[in-house]
Image (cartoon, helix red, strand yellow):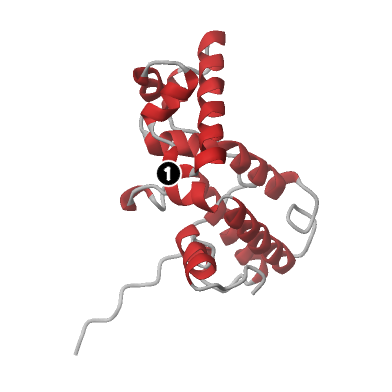
Amino acid sequence: MSAALPPFPKPEETVGPPELLRLGTGFEEDEPCLRADAARNRARLLEAAGRLVAEHGAAAVTMEAVAAAASVGKGTVFRRFGDRTGLLMALLDHSEKKFQAALLSGPPPLGPGAPPVERLRAFGCAMLRRSVDELELQLAAEPSAERRYTSPPRRFLRGHVALLLRQAAPDADSELLSHTLLAYLDAALVHHLTAQCGVPPER
């Protein structure tokens, strides 16, 4: 007879409200206050990358193309963003911060003040709308497998869903359920269903 299963792990405790995470590539941490010229260069690079996405799609965003579009050396782009994924994540950074702010302090039901089940529904709809709007960029910026579930934005969103699940169903396994619910909103799955299977986002 097989040995008994180990005890089920207790859900992680959340102390206080979730904090707004600082996003980006991680390269800004060494420069808490970017020099004025460095900040201008970063803004110019992101503007150039945004133009490339708008005109040619996310596939056109390479370090070389962004450097050429911003009239800077390729080394400048690598120093500022590290790699292509870091550059694409920086492009998504602004909308991610706005979304996090809406979850933490925006009007209900997405923000505080509504029952947890209503907030979960509003979260799912808002995430799906955002995925459809930014789908190509989100797919291009998808981290590698070992970083996929540990990136700060994903950890923040999963923590938010787990918190609402604990409020809505205190006896449920909120940690596992939060991963399950977010799996339905995965950018690759949204792309497969909407673009490859023709499933309308409303469904």
Secondary structure beneath dot 1 equals: helix
Visible residue check, residue 19: no
Residue in front for this viewpoint, 192 or 180: 192
Q: Which residue was labeled with disc 1? A: 59
Q: Where 79 falls versus 172 (above or below)?
A: above
Residue, x 53% and y 53% (percent of image)? 135
Visible residue check, residue 83: yes
Does 9 sit left or right of 121 as displayed?
left
Work out which residue is located at the far bottom of the displayed protein and give it.
1
Image quadrant where residue 86 sits: top left
Residue 99: percent from the left, percent from the top? 65, 46
Work out which residue is located at the far front of the displayed protein and give it.
55
Q: Where 13 falls versus 140 (above or below)?
A: below
Q: Where 49 falls versus 180 (above or below)?
A: above
Residue in front for this viewpoint, 157 or 60: 60
Residue 85: percent from the left, percent from the top? 40, 39
Q: Circle 1: is it few (<14), some (14-19), or many (20+) Cα within 10 Å?
A: few
Residue, x 61% and y 52% (percent of image)? 133
Work out which residue is located at the far left of the displayed protein and give it.
1
Residue 18: percent from the left, percent from the top? 61, 46
Residue, x 57% and y 40% (percent of image)? 54
